[in-house]
Image (cartoon, helix red, strand yellow):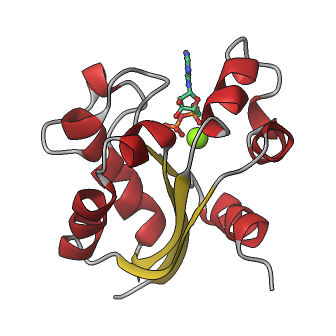
């Protein structure tokens, strides 16, 4: 049974800076995640703080928000069968050192903070995150 979903993906500053956008987009496409919207933007620290507010109590929150707003990012809506979980599997573990072989974070991630990509962790959060970046 097919279960068509949309999820939000972000290519983070470390990967944009290293010109990895097309390579990472190709990984999504090869894995049946269609990129139905994509834009390169730079967000403010306030916007990053709003986006990551679920993490506001974490010790790394301030650095995380500074980092996401430190340079251009590419935000995308990915669509496909079970897109939320399928993107999370393709991304790999938060810490690239713990990520499985052939995952985006294993291949490109530099560290737990500079881990190249963000992906929504549930369908509910995917809807919120898509609305955050692509409200019309
Ligand atoms: P996720 O991106 O795999 O969903 P989350 O736990 O939601 O991971 O954390 C959001 C982001 O915060 C991570 O992608 C990573 O960049 C950063 N982060 C998570 N844990 C740590 C940490 O222990 N130290 C520094 N940064 C962290
Ligand atoms: Mg998360």
60 vs 21, left or right, is right
120 vs 44, left or right, is left
Residue 35 x %, y %: 41, 79
Residue at (31% x, 41% y) in the render: 18
27 vs 77, left or right, is left
Position above or below: 21 against 46: below
60 vs 3, left or right, is right
Q: Within the displayed image, which quadrant is ligand 1 positioned in? A: top right
- Observer-nearest of 81 and 44: 44
Q: How many marks?
A: 0
- Observer-nearest of 47 and 16: 16
Position above or below: 57 against 78: above
Looking at the rendering, in which quadrant would you find the N terminus? bottom left
Q: Residue 32's image quarter?
A: bottom left
Q: Residue furthest left?
A: 101
Residue 39 x %, y %: 55, 71
Residue 61 x %, y %: 73, 22
Looking at the rendering, in which quadrant would you find the C terminus? bottom right
Residue at (61% x, 30% y) in the render: 67
Position above or below: 103 against 112: below
Residue 45 x %, y %: 79, 37
Residue at (31% x, 66% y) in the render: 25
Residue at (31% x, 32% y) in the render: 109
């Amino acid at each position: 049974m097919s279960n068509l979903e949309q999820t939000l993906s972000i290519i983070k500053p470390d990967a944009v800076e290293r010109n990895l956008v097309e390579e990472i987009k190709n990984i999504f496409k090869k894995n049946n995640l269609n990129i139905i919207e994509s834009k390169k933007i730079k967000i403010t620290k306030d916007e990053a703080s709003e986006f990551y507010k679920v993490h506001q109590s974490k010790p790394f929150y301030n650095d995380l928000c500074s980092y996401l707003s430190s340079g251009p990012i590419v935000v995308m809506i990915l669509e496909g069968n079970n897109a939320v979980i399928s993107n999370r599997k393709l991304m790999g573990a938060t810490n690239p050192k713990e990520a499985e072989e052939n995952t985006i974070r294993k291949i490109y991630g530099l560290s737990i903070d500079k881990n190249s990509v963000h992906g929504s962790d549930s369908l509910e959060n995917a809807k919120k995150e898509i609305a955050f970046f692509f409200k019309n």
